[in-house]
Amino acid sequence: MQDVNVLVVFPTRGESMERLALAAAVGAVQGRANIRLRCLEAAADRDFIAPRDADAEWADAILAISYGPADSLEQYIDSLGTRRDRVDSAALTSIEDARLHGRRAAEAARAQK
Amino acid sequence: MITIRKNSDRGHADHGWLNSWHTFSFADYYDPAHMGFRTLRVINDDRVAPGRGFGAHAHRDMEIISYVLEGSLAHKDSMGERHTIGPNTIQAMSAGTGIVHSEFNPSETEAVHFLQIWIEPAMEDVDPSYQQISFAPAEKRGKFRLLAGPHPGGSEASAIIHQDARVYVAELMPGETLRQPLAAGRFGWVQVARGEVTLNGQKLAEGDGAAIDAETELSFADSGAGGTEFLFFDLA
């Protein structure tokens, strides 16, 4: 099976947001992807770091995860330039949605390789 | 036959915040002659600086065991588990279909020293799970204390892993000895966590490992001045 890399980016800390992002990441792992999990919040603590250019370069798919519109996420996507075509931006409502979305993103990225 | 894996021959990575010795190939350390032993895939001897650790990362299809020797280790995962463990506690995770977790040293002053062990599971795609079992120090003094195995360990609680492998810890004081049979067809691995131990006449220092093949009786003796603690793996 071909390696596929999925970058999961989420805008803010907080337990519910983290659970959503973790579920998306687990879904991508279930889809047999390598994952990186990054948080945009400037004060992101030791569990998560902010995304770097190398992360987007590494990723076959970039999952931009949130519960709804998030300015910081939009700005991050805008900053990606030509790598924007790798972005799958999703406003999710449940943990199960997030897990399925992560899995599908991994599978779609693999299909495109 | 006993084959010693000397501590200084292990892979080594010093990242400043993390000082790690790899008994088997891991991360940037790759040696095809040391990819594991039987189903034992990883033994990392890690020292993590205060306030530092491993950010969120994923695992799949692996039995992951952490055993703290000094300090404490905070754990947070995608199953919602949030715990801090210290010495005399076994933490075992079955990654199965996939988990994401982070591990940190929550102390602002003390480093954490722990062994992280990966055992390949007998089956893929099991449901992820987390287990944590603490025990009294006396349970490992002068005897083997089962940490993990495929079945419950009787009167002493132990972690259940998806592999025909048993992980024990023992602590010996100066002058103490301990005997352990090894069934025909079984293999063993000894990893010295602290002090010095003599295994069937061969001296092992702190950080040394030993692969055991075709031995039926194992004799362990403390051979240092301050006692010893070691892990013993009984492997298919």
Image (cartoon, grey):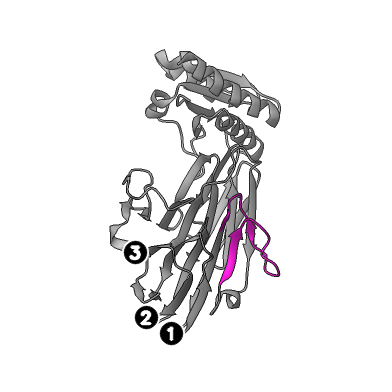
- SS for dot 2: loop
Residue B70 visible here: no
Compared to residue B218, the image places residue B75 above or below, namely above
Q: Quadrant of the N terminus of chain B?
A: bottom left
Compared to residue B31, the image places residue A34 above or below, namely above
**Highlighted range, magenta:** B144-165
- SS for dot 3: strand
- Identify the image quadrant of residue B155: bottom right
Chain of the residue that carries numbered disc 1 in the rendered image: B
Q: Amino acid at mark 2?
A: Gly
Q: Position of residue B132 (x, y in %)?
A: 63, 58
In this view, the residue in front, A61 or B148, is B148
Q: Is residue B156 magenta?
A: yes
Circles 2 and 1: CB distance less than 8 Å?
yes
- Residue B224 is marked as 2
Q: CA distance from mark 1 to mark 3?
A: 22 Å
Name the residue that disc number 1 marks.
Answer: B174
Residue at image position (38%, 80%) is B223
Q: Amino acid at mark 3?
A: Ile
Chain of the residue that carries numbered disc 2 in the rendered image: B
